[in-house]
Image (cartoon, rainbow, N blue to C red):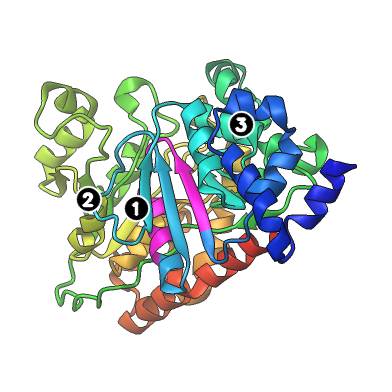
Amino acid sequence: MFKQWLKQLIPGRYRPWLLGILSFFNGLMNLPAALRFGLLDRETLFALNVSRHERRIVFVSERPSWREAKLAYGLKKIGWDVIQLHRFQPMFQDVSDFAEMQQFSSPWAASELAFKTRTKAFHTFSPNCDDTAVQMVTQKPGRVLVDFYDDFFGLTDGLPDARDKFAVEIAKQEFCIEKADALCCRDIQLQYRRKALGIGRHRPVICFPDYCWNRDSLRPAREDDAVHIVQTGWVGFESRGEEDIGCFLVARKFVDAGCHFHFYLHPTFPALGSALFKSVFEQYIDLGAKTGRVHFHATVPPHEIAGEMAKYDYGFGMMNAANFPDIPWKHSNPKRLPYCGSSRVFDYLDAGLGILLDGNLRYMRHVFEPYGVLFNGTAILKGGNIYEALRQKPSRPALVGAREALSLERHVPRLAKFYESLG
């Protein structure tokens, strides 16, 4: 009876005679977890932990990435405070958009620190559903949203070798989806076979891509007729047996047609000029030596990449097997492609580039085609006259309009309302 009365009473407006009781229970929140759980059950702790802080959210990440920085920027714009709990140093240096940065030492310490914030909602970022995410959805210091990148079940469905390779990730991800109070998704991968499988059903879900910063004015367009295509982000390598998810065969088609191709190295790729770089990029290096139209650039920090790419015409997001039907899929399930998104595409738009994508990426086409800035790369390849098709570059007004329509500032109120709905 006492617990039921307490859970009904605490979330309401406090009365003076409750202050003594509240101070006692607030003191409990500073005790070690093992002792707290021995005194009160988790549901009662949650009722006590929710002290009705308005317009505040706690981000939890092993290593905060550019997505967390973007969302913190947008939320601050509309008056929200963001507390970032992190295990490793963030991938970004500017933390001015966060109200607080607090570091934890282990997944258990993350949930301990989360309880101490006494906040009602926690946005847990975990591209691969790591142990910290598992801990957060298990201990539940409040309402826990899980935000992941690739859906590992969809990625490996129908490919036994791939399923074996990602068995641990699949198990952790499905556990987190089932235990979370809500899901925040960058695209609609979760919809792949969701009705048949029942994964994550009856959970509140928000689809919230990375969107554009839309902070800097576009550079003036080049006046020459040359076509420059740029690729950034992760890609598979044919030299490592990843011909299906590689992009060299597609890139070669554009280069042979007269286009320049620029490659900005992903942070996980071998350093420019190293022996390993020369090994994995061997085909690109040979093509560049023959044509003079393949160019390599060292890794650029995320906050500089849009400005660096602004001198080109198109951002590239294509794979071999999606465009050459005779190449068998080995590393990922092609049936999931219509549901997939791509964070790099918003970087391309921020840079003022046209977007050159596989026709199979239907969700991305749905997002970008209405603004006249997306080019169906598959259709262009099949059309034959590649260079002429790309000389008709997207207009500046179209790019400006697309960046505004797909800007973080325009869409972040929707995320804030979703947070509020979880109270």
Q: Quadrant of the C terminus?
A: bottom right
Q: Quadrant of the N terminus?
A: top right
Q: Where in the figure is residue 46, as x and y percent of width and height?
A: 69, 44
Q: Secondary structure at mark 2?
A: strand
Q: Secondary structure at mark 3?
A: helix
Task: Report which residue position mark 3 lands on.
Answer: 173
Task: Report which residue position mark 1 lands on.
Answer: 316
Crowd rating for badge 3 (residues with CA inside 10 Å; few <14, some 14–19, many 20+): many
Residue situated in front as seen by the camera: 170 or 3: 3
At label 2, the amino acid type is: Phe
Q: Compute the Cα span from label 1 to label 3.
A: 29 Å
Q: Secondary structure at mark 1?
A: strand
Task: Report which residue position mark 2 lands on.
Answer: 261
Q: Earlier in the sequence, mark 1 or mark 2?
A: 2
Q: Compute the Cα span from label 1 to label 2.
A: 9 Å
**Direction from residue 373 to residue 279 in the image, left or right:** left
Residue 307 lies in quadrant: bottom left
- Check whether the beta carbons of the residues at disc 2 and disc 3 lie within 8 A of each other: no
State whether residue 400 appears in this view. yes
At label 3, the amino acid type is: Gln
**Direction from residue 347 to residue 376 in the image, left or right:** right
Q: Which range of residues does the magenta coloring cover?
A: 57-73
Q: Is residue 292 magenta?
A: no
Q: Where in the figure is residue 148, as x and y percent of width and height?
A: 54, 41
Q: Residue at x 67, y 28 (%)?
A: 37
